[in-house]
Image (cartoon, grey):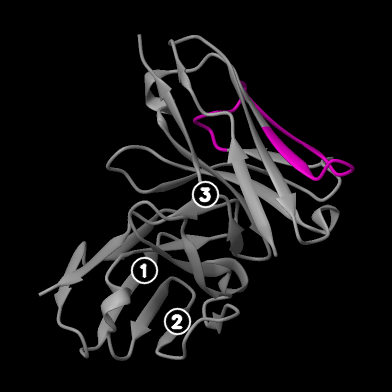
Amino acid sequence: QVQLVDSGGDLVKPGGSLRLSCAASGFTFSDYYMAWIRQAPGQGLEWVSYLSQSGSATYYADSVKGRFTISRDNAKKSLNLQMNSLRVEDTAVYYCARWVGGMDVWGQGTTVTVSS
Amino acid sequence: EIVLTQSPGTLSLSPGERATLSCRASQTVNNNYLAWYQHKPGQAPRLLISGASNRATGIPDRFSGSGSGTDFTLTISRLEPEDFAVYYCQQYGISWTFGPGTKVDIK
């Protein structure tokens, strides 16, 4: 079945780095834009980053620009988010999602906690 | 940046009642590129509507989206117990933004 599985969340200190991954199955991964969305505790949804089918076009929210890097490996059907210079305010559940003009398939979420 | 405002913040209704949720944009949403999502605690969000009025696959017809330009509405014609959740709008006409959400809870 069509599925996304997020992983990589952890407890990290401010200024640290973390790499999130998302494994796709059940669909032709290379046909779709993919995205990362997050939800901080008690807050609403916030888009983080998304990229084109080939990975050549990438987009970032201002809050993460210059610190986060989105990438994909179509052969491995995986989506990644490299997060550097992490801040306390990056603490959130991070979801990967498939974009079809709306995000129709989501991972289960992986929790990132930035705290000293 | 397009700012989305959702109202009301909380909507308290009973099962069987009609829910009307509003999403207003600070400027025109290009091509009515607006989506609605349902989000329940501990679950991933669920796409309900894209393109302002197109129901996503598998979404019951009690959910409908309408509107254009800067004013959009999500209507749930008769609330079922599983519909109590937080609802977000998202515009994707110029970059992306999410609204702050409307919580629909049980009266």
Task: Please report contact status of discs 1 and 2: CB closer than 8 Å, yes or no.
Answer: yes
Q: Is residue B54 left or right of residue A3?
A: left
* Quarter of the picture holding the N terminus of chain A: bottom right
Image coordinates for residue B96, horizontal then vertical, percent: 55, 52
Placement of B39 over or under A67, stated as above or below: below
| Amino acid beneath label 1 | Cys
State which quadrant residue B65 falls in: bottom left
Mark linked to residue B10? none
Q: Residues within 10 Å of mark 1 (few under 14, many from 20)?
A: many
User: Is there one chain holding both mark 2 and mark 3?
Assistant: no
Q: Residues within 10 Å of mark 2 (few under 14, many from 20)?
A: some
Q: Can you tell which of label 1 and label 3 is closer to the viewer?
A: 3
Q: Can you tell which of label 2 and label 3 is closer to the viewer?
A: 3
Q: Return the residue at label 1.
A: B23
| Amino acid beneath label 2 | Gly
Q: Which residues are magenta?
A: A61-80
Q: Nearer the viewer, residue A19 or A56?
A: A19
Q: Return the residue at label 3.
A: A108
